Image (cartoon, rainbow, N blue to C red):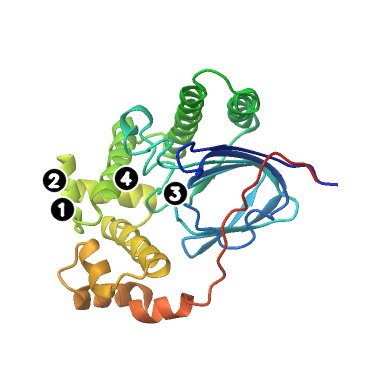
Amino acid sequence: MKTESVMILRNPADGELDFRVIHFEGDQHFNKVQRVPYFSIILVSEGDGELKADFTDYQISKKALLFFSPFQPFMINGATLKGVMINFHPDFFCIFRHRIEVACDGILFNPPNNPPFFNISENESSSIYSIVELITAEMSGGGLAQHDLLIAYLKILLITAIRIKFLKCTTSMSLDQDTSDVALLRQLNRMIELHFKTKHSGGEYADLLNIPVKTLGRIVKNHFKRTLTEIISERIIMEAKRELNLTSKTLKEIAYNLGFNDEYHFSRYFKNKIKVSPQSFRNSLRNAPHSSVASGTLYTT
């Protein structure tokens, strides 16, 4: 017998979902491709499974913490999974508007050149769950200034997750690396996320960071085991794949959106990286399965 709870807060103006907490068992919420208009945070407390996200397969297991942006395609298969998912609409809490407080876009959501998840320890999982419990209690009881309180708890959750990820990033680097390298790589990730649609060369990011391009390239190569050019290209291609998969934009529109002078330049760039043309890639996805996360009210089964 499975027991689940789904708690939803809707926008009083239009009835659309603002905020949702799902305590889940199994993979029924994720076993078809998800393209939902919400931010999603998932903490796996038990079990293991396979994650498909941004055209890459990953294995996930107990204590995985996952982050997905609105309309980012993902699918999880794993009958033994248990955990909690939080969804929130960008109108409820805008990551861009609150970037100074939480600085999580490009770190938790849309991390350049990294999987959309990371594993945490038992103690770190307990810290996250304690915040989730506060959110769940507020969703159950409600009261004065519920919206403000939920946003406050959400900020705490995001900041806690960022601190955990930063610590892992720092400790994963060699002991002889200066901490300034860690800070530089964080800034680079942020700059790529902000400018990848308009800046395609390593030299442009070196200028933004006020560092010689050779020095930046060496630090990137030492840490990511890939060149700076490859790092930038991977982010551009990821966005191109999303546009081809999720929108009906023409190749010309996608090309201009990603900073290419024309669709022919974009097509050559894409085919050089992926080995197929953008149109062939789009055609191959036309019959891909599609679904949205199920909505509902508090229930048990």
* Left or right relative to 1: residue 89: left
Q: Position of residue 190 (x, y in %)?
A: 30, 42
Q: Are marks 1 and 3 in contact (CB under 8 Å)?
A: no
Between marks 4 and 3 in the image, the one whose residue lies nearer the viewer: 3
**Amino acid type of the residue that numbered disc 4 sits on in the rendered structure:** Asn
Q: Earlier in the sequence, mark 2 or mark 3?
A: 3
- Between the residue at mark 4 and the residue at mark 1, the CA separation in whole angstroms equals 15 Å
In the picture as drawn, the residue positioned furthest to the right comes out as 1
Task: Please give the residue where the numbered disc 1 appears in the rendered image.
Answer: 203
Q: Position of residue 95 (x, y in %)?
A: 37, 38
Q: Position of residue 10 (x, y in %)?
A: 53, 38
Residue depicted at x 27% and y 55% = 228
Label 1: element kind: helix
- Between the residue at mark 1 and the residue at mark 3, the CA separation in whole angstroms equals 29 Å
Label 3: element kind: loop
**Amino acid type of the residue that numbered disc 1 sits on in the rendered structure:** Gly
Q: Earlier in the sequence, mark 4 or mark 2?
A: 4
Mark 3 surroundings within 10 Å by alpha-carbon count, few (fewer than 14), some (14 through 19), many (20 or more): many
Mark 4 surroundings within 10 Å by alpha-carbon count, few (fewer than 14), some (14 through 19), many (20 or more): some
* Left or right relative to 18: residue 296: right
Q: Which mark is residue 69?
A: 3
- Between the residue at mark 1 and the residue at mark 2, the CA separation in whole angstroms equals 6 Å
Q: Are marks 1 and 2 in contact (CB under 8 Å)?
A: yes
Task: Please give the residue where the numbered disc 4 appears in the rendered image.
Answer: 189
Q: Are marks 4 and 2 in contact (CB under 8 Å)?
A: no
Pick the residue in front: 167 or 221.
Answer: 167
Number of marks in picture: 4
Q: Earlier in the sequence, mark 1 or mark 3?
A: 3
Q: Which mark is residue 207?
A: 2
**Amino acid type of the residue that numbered disc 2 sits on in the rendered structure:** Asp
